[in-house]
Amino acid sequence: MTVLVTGAAGFIGSHLAHALLDRGRRVVGVDNLNDYYDPLLKQARLARLEAREGFGFHKLELADRTALPALCTARPEIEQVAHMAAQAGVRYSLINPFAYVDANVTGQLVVMEASRRLPRLRHLVYASSSSVYGANAKLPFAVEDRVDTPVSLYAATKRSGELVAECYARLHRLPTTGLRFFTVYGPWGRPDMSPYLFTKAIFEGKPIQVFNKGKMRRDFTYIDDIVAGVLAALETPPEAEGDAPPHRLYNLGNHRSEDLMHFIAVLERACGREAVKEFTGMQPGDVEETCADIETARRDLGFEPKTTIEDGLPRFVDWFREYHGV
C-alpha cells in the first residue's frame, strides 16, 4: 500500500512516515521545507527518511494549485492520504497571517481536491488542532462542543480546514477523518514549542518565559501516542450514515491536564539543573487550559495514550542532548 504524507519533514509527519515504513508501507512524502523554524532540523529529519527503502520525497508548496494534483496524477496507486502539513504556531499568526490562510485553508482545499481524484483512495486523514476550541470554558474539550469562538487566526484556519473537509466528504463522499492534536512533544520536536524552548534556555542558562505567571495547564501528548492514534485512524475509514457524510472528528490528547509549573519541574529534573524563570502575562491568542475528552477516539480507534510527562520529557531531553551535543 502507498500512503501520501504531507509535511513529511515536519515533527509529526516524519514520525508518522517512519511508522508507516516500519509497517511495510510505501510512503510518498511532500514538504515545502520552509524557514518558519530552522530548516536544518527539517532536513535532518528528512535525511533519516530518505535513507529508508520505500520512501520518496517531493518538495512542493501545497498552496500551489497544480503541484500536488500533478503528483497525485502521476501516483494513482496512492490509497491513503495523511495530511499533516500546516503553518503551525499561534503567536506567529499575529505576525504573518497570510501564511496561515495559504497553508491551512488553500492548502487544505488543494489536498482535498487532489485526493478526491485518486482512483484507489480509501481514506484521507488530516491534522487539526485543539486550538479550535478557542474560548470554550467547558473542560475537558469534546468533539461535540461548539467551536465558533477562535482566539487566534491559527485556530480559525484550522477550523476552516475542518469545514472544507466536511464539505468535500458531503459532496464527493470522500472518507475523511480530522484529528485534533493536543500539545504534541517528543524527540525531533518543534523549536517553537515550550519543551524545546525551555530545554534550550535551561542548558544555556537563560531565562524561560512563564506566561500568565505560571497559571496555565496543558494536555501534553507524547509523539508515539499521537502516531498510534493517526495509524489507527488511517485504518478506520468512516462510512456515510444516511444524510451524514463520511467525515469524523476525534481528539488525540493525553486526557490529562498538567500544571505548567509541574511541567517545568519535571523538565528541570530531566535537565539536571534549575530554570531561570521570568514570569509574564498572558499572550494574545493563548488560553489558560486545555484537556482532551478522548472517549470517542477510545471507542472508535482504540486510542489509549500511555506516556506521562514524567516518562516523555526525559526522552525528549535525551534526544536534545544528542542532537545538539550538549
Image: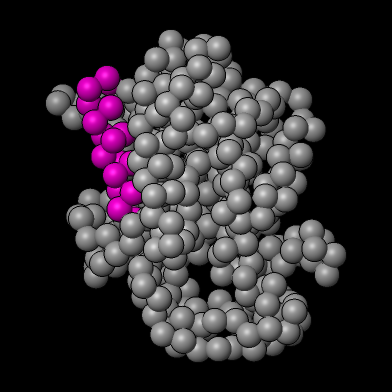
Residue 249 in the figure: left or right of residue 41:
left
Q: Position of residue 323 (x, y in %)?
A: 79, 59
Of 282 and 252, the residue lying toward us: 282
| On screen, residue 90 above or below 295 | below
> Residue at the location (32% across, 23% down)?
174
Of 74 and 251, the residue lying toward us: 74
Magenta stretch contains residue 158: yes
Q: Residue furthest right?
A: 325
Q: How is the image coloured?
A: one colour
The C terminus lies in quadrant: bottom right
* Residue 52 shows in the view: yes
Q: Quadrant of residue 154?
A: bottom left
Q: Position of residue 143 (x, y in %)?
A: 28, 51
Q: Position of residue 306 (x, y in %)?
A: 55, 57
* Residue 252 shows in the view: no
Q: Quadrant of residue 95?
A: bottom left
Residue 100 in the figure: left or right of residue 27:
left
Main SS, magenta residues:
helix
Of 20 and 158, the residue lying toward us: 158
Q: Residue furthest left?
A: 243
> Residue at the location (43% across, 49% down)?
99
> Residue at the location (76% across, 40% down)?
48
Number of callouts: 0
Magenta stretch contains residue 132: no
> Residue at the location (68% across, 77% down)?
201
Q: Which residues are magenta?
A: 155-173
Q: Position of residue 1 (x, y in %)?
A: 58, 18
